Image (cartoon, helix red, strand yellow):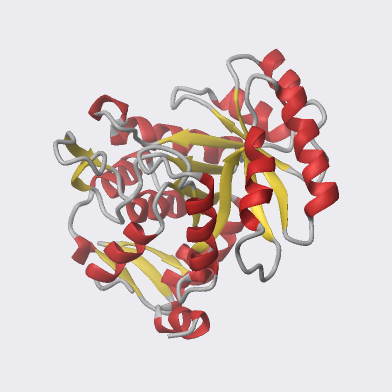
Amino acid sequence: MTPALAAQHAPAALQALLAELIDYAGLFPPASLDMSSAVANYARYAAGEYSWVLGRFILPASRLGEFKSAQKDVLIGIPWRLSALVGVDAGADHHAIAEFNRCNNSHAIVDTVEVKFSSTAEFKSLTEGVAPSICTYCEVPLSASTELLSWIRDRGARAKIRMGGVLPNAIPPARAVAHFIANCVVAGTALKATAGLHHPLRGLNRLTNEVNAPTSKMHGFLNLFLALLLAYDGATVEVIARVLDEECDRNFVFNDSEARWIAERIRTGQILAARERFAISFGSCSFDEPIEDLRDFRFL
């Protein structure tokens, strides 16, 4: 099935929710692939039937040279979009990004950076030198105030939240996530998510691919993004939390005109608007696993 046919096969509301949703982070745990393998995987996904679900390739800015060498071995279609993580040596990272974009924009371009900061002063040092055309995501704790989220918005940046990790205690409670989402709506701050979102629905899963890996209730990316869409459309914290905690696939319904969770519903046009302005994407070290799960649940 071609990418166009694969997209057409999905209901319009689901297409709107899934379009360019998954940023590929194969370099990061628990996958922790080498650069050549991650680049080869992304090339395969970009040419595959679910390429319409694929977002950016995520990598540390310090590894852009390594990426450039690895990308020479794959067939390039349209330029790949990259999201570069800025580390402690922000000046060197921003110089690497600028040089990469100057020399390599016919094959790939960094159009997004991601930073983690503990103070507004540190934000300035981490982002000084970012080109105006590059969007900045700021990883913040779920306890971030609406004032901080508004401060991020006022600087043309967006928020980033962590939804899990390789240990059970890294998974935040649904209520805390719901309050954070509500604060982002109040602040008018768009966001992306990362970590722990390999599966569409909330449920008990292994946290890594190791044989004796710990298991825990993990958040689902369909839960999260439908909760985000409903929140943007005015849903209460209570509704948001209940959507995040939902484990029954039959309570999620998608058709051409709308998406529904039990009695809550949102029109396809509203989904498109919310995805563009508010609920942007999530990073996952696997692309195959989320797609396979969507197919197993018969969403795709």
Say left or right for 300 vs 149.
left
- Counting from the top left corner in percent of width and height, residue 149 is at 59, 29
For the point 38% across and 35% down, the residue is: 177
In the image, 134 versus 263, the foreground residue is 134
For the point 53% across and 51% down, the residue is: 36
Say left or right for 26 vs 139.
left
Total numbered labels: 0
Which quarter of the picture shows residue 216? top left
- Counting from the top left corner in percent of width and height, residue 45 is at 49, 66
Q: Is residue 84 above or below residue 115?
A: below
Q: Quadrant of the C terminus?
A: bottom left
Q: Is residue 128 above or below residue 11?
A: above
Q: Residue furthest right?
A: 102
Say left or right for 64 vs 258.
right
In the image, 169 versus 261, the foreground residue is 169
- Counting from the top left corner in percent of width and height, residue 44 is at 49, 67
For the point 65% across and 30% down, the residue is: 86
Say left or right for 227 vs 92.
left
Q: Quadrant of the N terminus?
A: bottom left
Q: Is residue 23 above or below residue 11?
A: above
Can the viewer see residue 85 in this picture?
no
